[in-house]
Amino acid sequence: MNAFMVVCTFKPGTNMDDVFAVVAEEQAAVQSLQSAGRLESVKLSLGRGTVFLEVRAENPVAAATTVEELPMAKWWNLDVFPLGAPSA
């Protein structure tokens, strides 16, 4: 499995009341993906409306597919970046 950082930004016009209504469902889905070893960390920048997800997957498409399993993904634009160790 490879590591990816998926940067999620809210689509224009997203109703944040709808987003907050699925927080408990989102948390349960995050725990499930973490237990499966497919999602490492979740970081939020609320002021910028950005979510950073460290995902384990075979390739960028599989990383995006993992994120799309989250309830909030329908409100996000995704940018997927492969992660690697810096050169020595």
Image (tube, rainbow, N blue to C red):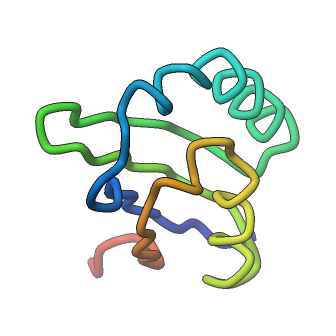
Residue at the image point whose x is 45% and y is 58% from the top: 76
87 or 68, nearer to the observer: 68
Count of residue discs: 0
17 or 73, nearer to the observer: 17
> Seen in the image, is 32 located left or right of residue 17?
right
Quarter of the image with the C terminus is bottom left
Residue at the image point whose x is 39% and y is 70% from the top: 85
In this rendering, is residue 17 above or below 15?
above
* Residue 37 % position (x, y): 79, 45
* Residue 71 % position (x, y): 67, 42
- The residue furthest top is 24
Q: Place residue 15 in its image quadrant.
A: top left
Residue at the image point whose x is 52% and y is 68% from the top: 4
In this rendering, is residue 25 above or below 42?
above
- The residue furthest left is 47
Residue at the image point whose x is 32% and y is 57% from the top: 9
Quarter of the image with the N terminus is bottom right
> Seen in the image, is 66 located left or right of residue 3?
right
> Seen in the image, is 61 located left or right of residue 87?
right
- The residue furthest right is 36
* Residue 16 % position (x, y): 36, 32
